[in-house]
Image (cartoon, rainbow, N blue to C red):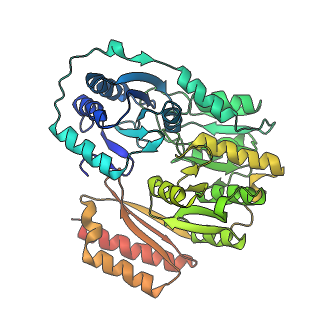
C-alpha cells in the first residue's frame, strides 16, 4: 500500500506526514460508520499538527471530534470500544521524534486491509480544503482517567519496589498514576517529555537504561515501555532482561494452573525463540505461530478463541481484556503473577530454555532486495540443510530496513548463517 504499513501510516513529520495528508485522512473517516472520532497522541512535537489536521478533516465530513490528549495507544483502543467509535492515535511508537504516524481503530480493532485500501483511494482523490473551525473539537481528559480506572481494576496492591521507564512517551502520566496506586515503592525514570526526547536512549528499545536503574535501586522488578505504550519489556531483580516471549511463558503457565488458558494454547510469531516454544511444550502448552505483526497474532486468536498471544518485542495481547497490545496491562498481569505465587521473576523464568538467536537490522536503499532469487535460494537452502532452524528475512513495515533473524541451537553455526545472508544482501543492495 502507498500509505499504510504494518502498523498504520508512518513517515517523517512535516515531510511525508503533513497537515494536508492529515486533513485527507480525517475526511476519509467518512467511510467508517461512526459519528464520533476520538483522537489521542504521544509526546512528539509534531503531534498537534497531525491531530489538528485530522480533526479538521473529520469535522468537515460531519463527524464529532474529541481530543483525548496524551494517552497510550491501548487507551485509545479501550475508549473506542466503550464509545463504539473511531479511535485515532498519533504516534510512531518506538521510532525517534522526527517520525510520526497515524493508527486508526474502530471499536477497538485496527482496520482490515480492504478498508485501508478504500481509505488510500479516498486520500488520493480528496482535497485538503476545509471550511470548519477547530473550536468545534471537544477536549475530554476524563477518557484518560477512565482508562486508568480500567487498568487499576486488574491490579493487586503490593510492597514490591518497582521501576518504570516510560520512554518520555505516551505512558509518562498514565503509568505513573496507575503504579503509584499499586505500590508505595515506585521509581519512575524517563518521564519528562519535551517533544523531542521520546525514545531517546530510553524505553523498551534501549533497555540498558532500565537495567541500570533496577540494579542501582535494588528494585524487585522494572518495566520499560515504548513510545506509545503498546509494548513492554521487563528486567528482573538481578538485572536480567526478559522478552515478550518469556513474559508470555510466565503468564501462560499461571493461566493454565488457574484453568484460564482457553484451548490450552498461546499464539507467538515466527520470530519467537525456539527455546521458548520448546519450554512451553514441556509444560504441555500448545503453541501456534503466525507471521510477524500483532494484527496477525490477533487474527489467529479471534479465529480460534485463544486468550494469550504476542510478539518477542513485547506486544502482548490478553483478549479477555483488550484486542490490542497494552504494555501497562501486561506489566500489571506479570506483577500479579509474582504476587500470587510469591516468587521473584528470576525464579519464574529459571526453567526457560533460550536458544542462541540474532537479529541484524540492515539499512538498505531498496527493501525489495529480499525478493532477489539469490537471497531466496540461500535462505531456502539453509532451511533444508538445518531442519530445526528458524531463519527469517523480511522488510520492515515502518523503516528502510531489512531484518535478518536466526535462531538455532548452535551459536557458531547460527552466526555463520546470518553473516552469509547479511553479506549477500549488502552486495546486492548497491
Q: Residue 185, how many percent across, how many down? A: 76, 32
**Front one among 296 and 210:** 296
Q: How many marks?
A: 0
Q: Which residue reaches farthest right?
A: 342
Q: Is residue 6 left or right of residue 262?
A: left
Q: Is residue 62 left or right of residue 196?
A: left
Q: Which residue reaches farthest bottom?
A: 385
- Residue at 25% across, 32% down: 18
Q: Residue 321, how many percent across, how many down? A: 61, 43
Q: Residue 158, how many percent across, how many down? A: 80, 37
Q: Quadrant of the C terminus?
A: bottom left
**Front one among 155 and 260:** 260
Q: Is residue 312 visible?
A: no
Q: Is residue 337 visible?
A: yes
- Residue at 34% across, 80% down: 378
- Residue at 67% across, 64% down: 264
**Front one among 35 and 344:** 35
Is residue 315 depicted above or below 129 in this figure? below
- Residue at 27% across, 78% down: 374
Q: Which residue reaches farthest top?
A: 135
Quarter of image, res 8: top left
Is residue 38 depicted above or below 135 in this figure? below
Q: Residue 263, how many percent across, how many down? A: 65, 63
Amino acid at each position: 500500500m502507498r500509505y499504510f504499513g504494518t502498523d498504520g501510516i508512518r513517515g517523517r513529520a512535516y515531510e511525508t506526514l503533513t497537515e494536508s495528508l492529515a486533513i485527507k485522512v480525517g475526511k476519509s473517516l467518512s467511510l467508517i460508520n461512526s459519528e464520533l472520532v476520538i483522537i489521542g497522541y504521544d509526546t512528539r512535537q509534531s503531534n498537534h499538527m497531525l491531530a489538528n489536521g485530522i480533526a479538521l478533516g473529520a469535522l468537515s465530513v460531519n463527524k464529532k471530534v474529541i481530543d483525548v490528549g496524551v494517552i497510550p495507544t491501548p487507551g485509545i483502543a479501550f475508549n473506542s470500544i466503550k464509545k463504539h467509535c473511531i479511535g485515532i492515535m498519533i504516534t510512531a511508537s518506538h521510532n525517534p521524534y522526527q517520525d510520526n504516524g497515524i493508527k486508526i481503530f474502530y471499536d477497538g480493532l485496527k482496520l482490515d486491509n480492504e478498508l485501508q485500501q478504500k481509505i488510500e483511494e479516498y486520500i488520493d482523490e480528496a482535497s485538503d480544503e476545509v471550511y470548519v473551525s477547530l473550536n468545534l473539537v471537544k477536549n475530554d481528559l476524563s477518557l484518560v482517567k477512565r482508562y486508568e480506572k480500567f487498568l487499576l481494576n486488574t491490579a493487586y496492591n503490593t510492597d514490591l519496589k518497582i521501576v518504570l521507564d516510560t520512554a518520555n512517551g505516551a505512558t509518562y502520566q498514565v503509568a505513573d498514576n496507575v503504579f503509584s496506586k499499586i505500590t508505595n515503592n515506585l521509581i519512575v525514570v524517563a518521564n519528562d517529555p519535551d517533544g523531542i526526547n521520546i525514545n531517546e536512549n530510553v524505553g523498551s528499545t534501549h533497555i540498558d537504561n532500565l537495567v541500570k536503574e533496577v540494579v542501582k535501586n535494588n528494585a524487585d522488578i522494572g518495566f520499560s515501555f515504548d513510545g506509545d505504550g503498546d509494548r513492554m519489556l521487563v528486567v528482573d531483580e538481578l538485572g536480567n532482561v526478559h522478552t515478550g516471549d518469556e513474559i508470555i511463558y510466565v503468564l501462560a503457565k499461571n493461566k493454565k494452573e488457574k484453568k484460564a488458558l482457553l484451548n490450552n494454547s498461546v499464539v507467538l510469531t515466527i520470530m519467537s525463540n525456539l527455546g521458548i516454544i520448546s519450554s512451553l511444550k514441556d509444560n504441555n502448552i500448545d503453541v501456534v505461530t503466525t507471521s510477524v505483526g500483532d494484527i496477525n497474532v490477533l487474527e489467529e486468536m479471534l479465529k480460534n478463541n485463544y486468550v494469550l498471544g504476542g510478539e518477542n518485542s513485547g506486544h502482548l495481547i490478553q483478549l479477555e481484556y483488550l484486542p490490542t497490545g497494552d504494555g501497562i496491562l501486561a506489566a500489571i498481569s506479570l506483577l500479579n503473577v509474582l504476587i500470587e505465587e510469591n516468587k521473584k521473576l528470576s525464579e519464574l523464568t529459571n526453567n526457560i530454555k533460550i536458544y542462541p538467536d540474532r537479529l541484524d537490522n540492515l539499512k538498505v536503499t531498496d527493501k525489495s532486495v529480499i525478493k532477489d532469487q539469490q537471497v531466496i535460494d540461500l535462505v531456502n537452502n539453509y532451511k533444508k540443510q538445518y531442519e530445526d532452524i528458524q531463519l527469517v528475512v523480511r522488510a520492515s513495515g515502518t523503516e528502510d530496513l531489512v531484518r535478518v533473524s536466526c535462531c538455532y541451537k548452535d551459536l557458531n553455526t547460527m552466526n555463520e548463517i546470518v553473516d552469509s545472508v547479511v553479506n549477500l544482501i549488502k552486495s546486492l543492495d548497491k
